[in-house]
Image (cartoon, rainbow, N blue to C red):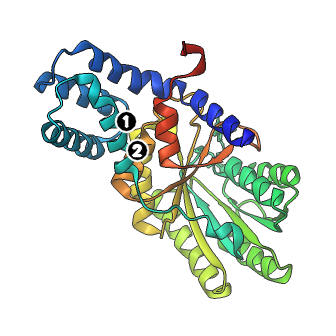
Amino acid sequence: MAEEKGFFKRLVSGLTKTRDNIVSGMDSIFHGFSHIDEDFYEELEEVLIMGDLGVQATEDILDDLREKVKERHIKEPSDCRQILIDSIKEQMDVGETAYEFEGRTSVVMVVGVNGVGKTTTIGKLAGKLRAQNKKVILAAADTFRAAAGEQLKEWANRAQAELIGGQEGSDPAAVVYDAVQAAKARHADVLLCDTAGRLHNKKNLMEELRKMNRIIDREYPEAFRETLVVLDATTGQNALQQAKDFKDVADITGIILTKMDGTAKGGIAVAIQAELGIPVKYIGVGETIEDLQKFDADTFVDALFAVPEEKEE
Ligand SMILES: Nc1nc2c(ncn2[C@@H]2O[C@H](COP(=O)(O)OP(=O)(O)OP(=O)(O)O)[C@@H](O)[C@H]2O)c(=O)[nH]1
Ligand SMILES: [Mg+2]
């Protein structure tokens, strides 16, 4: 329980900039308007859009609010606050978020454009799984960038996981092949595959992903599969577009939003779940091995709208 409380506190503090960006704007509308009219809705819309909740989610949230205001004969703008909170939660509901791979023999492909935090996230995930006493193998299938293998090796050491790598410029699919054989031979619980964020072009990158997937399908059909897209929360709406691009070529099972610490654009978590229907499974809240947390939409919204302690009376 104490740990849970600490976790929530860290989330509340990590969301400070997003809160300043969205919630304080909303609160000034709730307090600044004496009645609910078109201007009120328009200003709310602006705050939600500026807060990176996305056009789709914003419209749905406001439609829902209008309906409830009518139904419940609400007159006070401040009475809209809780309705809005509930409505955001409802928008983000993508059903039960599954972490089945953590308890199965699984292969987790981690994809995303360059610099979003794939390698770091794999290191953190490996740390989490090792803490549960799982046997973890990391595949350094980013053979494109010179230092990528070294970087993953450091994380493997930190997390005490095994690493399978290849020469720079070698075929990433061959690395995946070797890693799968190693995972089978050594009875690994989870194989985490790091991939390149940048190849010669986007088509190339997507082709490479397909190829790796085919190899895992063929060589390791009994493994439970997970494909996670890593997105950098600080890039706001760009992150949403990246998720859509990957969704077109791969069977994406979840999203990891990194760099949630210190960004004002945390609202993108709402847009992603509402518009893509793909669960955000983890969020990155810093650069160390502990800075990866499971994501729960309700907790996220509660933390976003929480009154930070120093502001409490
Ligand atoms: N503040 C913060 N920084 C992060 C987080 N996740 C990753 N980073 C930092 O982001 C930078 C890029 O991370 P990488 O893990 O190298 O990203 P990548 O996607 O593997 O990059 P490429 O291999 O070049 O495609 C590093 O400096 C990380 O420390 C996070 O949750 N919070
Ligand atoms: Mg990397």
Q: Is residue 31 left or right of residue 144?
A: left
Q: Nearer the viewer, residue 77 or 157?
A: 77
Instruction: Give whichever of discs 2 and 1 has the lower sequence position.
Output: 1
Q: Is residue 133 left or right of residue 49?
A: right
From the top left corner, tell me how far across and down residue 231 is, in percent.
Answer: 52, 47
Label 1 crowd (10 A; few <14 / some 14-19 / many >=20): many
- Amino acid at the residue labelled 2: Val
Which tag is nearer the camera, tag 2 or tag 1? 2
Q: Secondary structure at mark 1?
A: loop
Relative to 294, say whether 76 is above or below.
above
**In the rendering, which numbered label is found on residue 52?**
1
Relative to 295, say whether 286 is above or below.
above
Query: What residue is shown with label 2?
Result: 270
Q: Is residue 269 left or right of residue 137?
A: left
Question: Which quadrant of the view contains residue 83?
Answer: top left
From the top left corner, tell me how far across and down residue 313 is, in percent.
Answer: 54, 12
Question: Which quadrant of the view contains residue 42?
Answer: top left
Q: Residue at x 88, y 53 (%)?
A: 157
Q: Is residue 232 left or right of residue 44?
A: right
